[in-house]
Amino acid sequence: MVVLERAEFDPRHGNGQSVFDLNVALMVITNILMILRLYVRGIMAKNLGWDDLLAVVAWGLVMTFSCIEIVLLTKGVGYHIQDVPKETLLQFLSLSPVDKLVFILAGGFVRLSILACLPRINRDRSFMTCVYGVFVATIITAVASFLFVLLSCSPVSDVFNAAKPDRQCVSKYSLSRMRWAHSIMSTILNVVILSLCIWVSASTNKTRAQVIKMTLMLLLGLFAVVSTITRLILLLTTNMNVDITYISLRVAPFFSLEINSGLWCGCLPAFQPLFEWTNNHYYNHYNMRKLSRSSAQEPLNDSWNRDYMTANPHVSIHGQPRDLKGNKTASDAESATGFAMLENERGIKLTTEFSVHVEDRVYTGEGSEDIVSRTPVWNAF
C-alpha cells in the first residue's frame, strides 16, 4: 500500500497574489482620496459635515476589510480545502464571520455617506423625500444583516470560534440565503443611489468642472453597480459550502471593488472647492499673461474673458463697441480705445477710456456725472 504525502501548505505560494495586489492598490488610492477630501473640506472650504463623518467611519471600515482580506490569504484562501491543514482551516472559518460583519458595515456606511452628501447639491422636497427613504432602507438592510450574522450562534462567542465542538448555530443554508438577500438588497440600493446621482446632476446648472466631476461620479457609481451585480451572480451560481477556501478567491475581488469604488464616489463632490481654486488660479494666470503681451498680439476672440464679463451683470464697462460674440464692430478711431506712440519708450502704450456704473448708487446732488478716467491697462487692472 502506497501512501501519498500531501503537499506542504505554504500561504506565500497560493493563488491569492492578485487579490493581495488588488487590495493594496485599492487601499493606497482610497487613502489618498480621503486625505485629500478632508484637506479640502476641513482646511480649504472649512465646511465639514455629517457626510464627512460618515465617510471617515466608512474609510476605517473599508481599510479594516481590506486588511482582513489580506490576512485570509494566509488562512487557506486560494487553496483547495483538502490541501489546507485543519488548524488553518479552523482559523479561516473563525475569521470569516468578522470579514462578513465588517463588509456589511462598510457597505452601509459608504452608502450613507453618499446619501448625506446629496442634500448639499439639491434640497428639492421630492428629491429629499427619496433620499430619506433610501437612507432608512440602507440602515434597515445593514442592521438586519449584521444582527443575523452576529446572532447566528448561541452564545454569540461561538460565531468566532469554529474549533468549538457541538456549536449551536444556524444552518449553512440559512447563512447562504441571508447572503443572497443582502446582495440583492445591496444591488437595488446601489442602483437607486446611482439614479439619485443622475437626477441631481440633471437638475442643476453645471459648469465645466461640475460636468467633469459628475461624469466621474456616475462612472464610478456604474462601476460599483457592475461589481455588485457580478458578485450577486457569482453567489447565486456558486455553492460556497463546497471547497469554500478555493471558491472564495473568485468572489473576493468584487467585495473590495464595490465598497472602495463607492467611497470614491462620495469623495468626488467634496472636491468642488479644489476645482474652483484651480479654475480661478488658471484664469488669473491667463489674464496676467494677456496684459503683459504687446497690443499687436491682442486676441480678437477672447471667449474666456467674454464669458467672465458677461457673467457679472452688475458691472458694465463702456468702451469700444462689440457685437454679441464680443468681436469689435468699430475702428480704433471711432471708439474710446486708442493707441499712443511713446516718444522715449519703445513699443506701444495702450490706454482705455471706460466708465463703471454701479447699481443703486446714492447720488449726493443733482446733475452728478460718471467719473471718466483715462489710465493705462495695468492701472485699470
Image: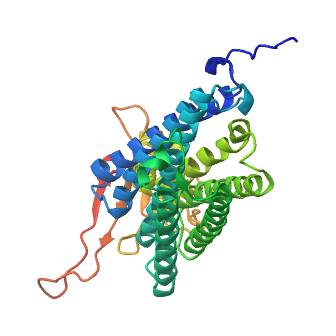
Q: Which percent across, then down, holds residue 62?
A: 48, 46
Farthest right residue in view: 1
Q: Is residue 356 left or right of residue 149?
A: left
How is the structure coloured here? rainbow
Q: Which percent across, then down, holds residue 119?
A: 43, 72
Q: In this view, does 154 lie to the left or right of 22?
A: left
Q: Which percent across, then down, holds residue 91?
A: 54, 34
Residue at coordinates 31% horizontally, 55% vertically from top-left?
45
Task: Establish if 29 lies above or below 5.
Answer: below
The N terminus appears in which quarter of the rendering? top right
Farthest left residue in view: 364
Q: Nearer the viewer, residue 319 or 129?
A: 129
Looking at the image, can residue 276 be seen? no
Q: Nearer the viewer, residue 35 or 351?
A: 35
Q: Nearer the viewer, residue 225 or 198?
A: 225
Q: Which percent across, then down, holds residue 94?
A: 52, 40
* Count of numbered marks: 0
Farthest front residue in view: 1
Residue at coordinates 30% horizontally, 58% vertically from top-left?
48
Quadrant in the rendering for residue 371: bottom left
Q: Nearer the viewer, residue 158 or 269?
A: 158
Task: Establish if 261 lies above or below 11.
Answer: below
Task: Establish if 231 lies above or below 198.
Answer: above
Quadrant in the rendering for residue 319: bottom left
Residue at coordinates 69% horizontally, 15% vertically from top-left?
8
Quadrant in the rendering for residue 250: top right
Looking at the image, can residue 45 be seen? yes
Residue at coordinates 43% horizontally, 58% vertically from top-left?
337
